[in-house]
Image (cartoon, rainbow, N blue to C red):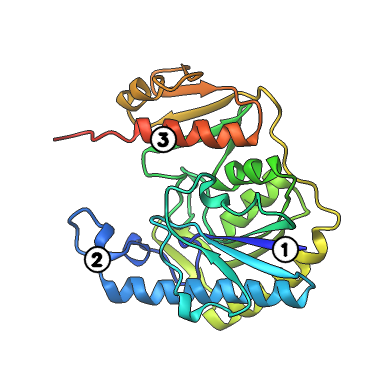
């Protein structure tokens, strides 16, 4: 069995500020500390390595890592475990789940994940962007963890590990069930504060969790989005909804809300990504 790791960054141990997760060239004119970002991306890479080591020790034949944060060029290639292959770069057809369609992939691991938009006491909680306020599947609020699980589920692949802050771990397990091994590397205090484990302790726990998550894959079930389920997106401004309904199959469901009904997880992925591109308009000159 192969394992796919979807590696995000906000849930990494020690991360509580956007400064730590934004490459200097991606700041839209605001100053960013390159030192802060470089330190965070090294910790991100080390946590991914721990998941790789645990997966291999648990019996995985191969581990493929998909850099899934922001521009998706954050992992440090030279520091990655030499046994893995990795995917980097943005505008991938499956986004954070690129690689789930590869032959032999039997489990997805989430590392460095964060809670859904609007979650109190959850460091850097958001869903995809800072202007998407909520995503719901048939009325159930979810985050990136749910969207990505539905995409992986289209290919018959279950999610069996999540690492990140305590709220992200709890929300993912609530959404997907106890088949998920959860490793909380920090406890949220506010949107910009947390009580962290020491990074070395976080790495050890992630390694152990990944080992267990390989075994969990034998009994885990993929998350299959019901065909025709209603997917609703709430934006921060009505102008985004104005643009989102230009996507075929997307309709207005409220002042700042749009809805669509995908036939499966792959259609969810394609429509969601198209809507987000349409809705991502400049809101001021």
Residue 275 location in percent, x, y?
43, 30
Residue 132 location in percent, x, y?
41, 37
- Looking at the image, how many numbered discs can be counted on the residues? 3
Side (left or right) of 274 relative to 137: left
Q: Earlier in the sequence, mark 3 or mark 1?
A: 1
- 1 vs 2, front mark: 1
Residue 2 shows which numbered tag?
1
Which residue appears at 50% of the width and 34% of the height?
272
Side (left or right) of 260 relative to 32: right
Q: Earlier in the sequence, mark 1 or mark 2?
A: 1
Whether 92 is drawn above or below 184: the answer is above
> Could you say whether the residue bearing mark 3 is in a helix, strand or loop?
helix
Nearest the eye: 11 or 266: 266
Which residue appears at 47% of the width and 75% of the height?
77
- Please name the residue that numbered disc 3 is placed on: 276
Whether 262 is drawn above or below 122: the answer is above
> Could you say whether the residue bearing mark 2 is in a helix, strand or loop?
loop
> Could you say whether the residue bearing mark 1 is in a helix, strand or loop?
strand
Q: Earlier in the sequence, mark 2 or mark 3?
A: 2
Which residue appears at 26% of the width and 71% of the height?
33
Q: Quadrant of the N terminus?
A: bottom right
Nearest the eye: 192 or 54: 54
Q: Quadrant of the C terminus?
A: top left
- Please name the residue that numbered disc 2 is placed on: 32
Q: Quick one: label 3, few (<14), some, or many (20+) residues within 10 Å? A: many
Asked whether residue 208 is in view, the answer is: no
Residue 27 shows which numbered tag?
none
- 3 vs 1, front mark: 1
Asked whether residue 23 is in view, the answer is: yes
Q: From mark 2 to mark 3, how far is it between C-alphas?
A: 26 Å
Which residue appears at 61% of the width and 36% of the height?
266
Q: Quick one: label 2, few (<14), some, or many (20+) residues within 10 Å? A: some
């Amino acid at each position: 069995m192969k394992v796919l790791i979807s590696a995000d960054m906000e849930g990494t141990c020690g991360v509580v500020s956007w400064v730590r997760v934004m490459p200097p060239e991606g700041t839209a004119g605001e100053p960013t500390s390159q030192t802060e970002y470089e330190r965070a991306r090294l910790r991100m890479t080390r946590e991914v390595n721990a998941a790789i080591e645990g997966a291999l020790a648990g019996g995985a034949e191969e581990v493929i890592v998909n850099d899934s944060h922001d521009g998706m060029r954050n992992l440090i290639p030279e520091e990655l475990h030499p046994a893995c292959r990795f995917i980097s770069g943005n505008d991938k057809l499956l986004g954070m789940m690129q690689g789930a369609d590869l032959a032999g992939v039997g489990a997805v691991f989430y590392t460095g994940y964060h809670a859904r938009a609007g979650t109190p006491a959850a460091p850097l909680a958001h869903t995809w962007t800072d202007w998407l306020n909520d995503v719901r599947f048939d009325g159930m609020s979810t985050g990136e963890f749910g969207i990505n699980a539905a995409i992986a589920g289209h290919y018959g692949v279950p999610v069996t590990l999540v690492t990140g802050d305590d709220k992200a771990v709890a929300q993912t397990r609530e959404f997907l069930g106890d088949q998920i091994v959860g490793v909380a590397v920090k406890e949220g205090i506010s949107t910009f504060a947390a009580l962290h484990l020491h990074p070395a302790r976080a790495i050890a726990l992630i390694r152990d969790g990944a080992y267990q998550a390989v075994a969990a894959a034998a009994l885990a079930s993929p998350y299959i989005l019901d065909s025709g389920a209603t997917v609703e997106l709430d934006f921060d401004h009505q102008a985004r909804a104005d643009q989102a309904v230009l996507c075929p199959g997307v309709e207005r469901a409220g002042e700042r809300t749009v809805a669509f009904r995908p036939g499966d997880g792959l259609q969810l992925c394609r429509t969601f990504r198209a809507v987000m591109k349409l809705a991502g308009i400049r809101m001021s000159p």
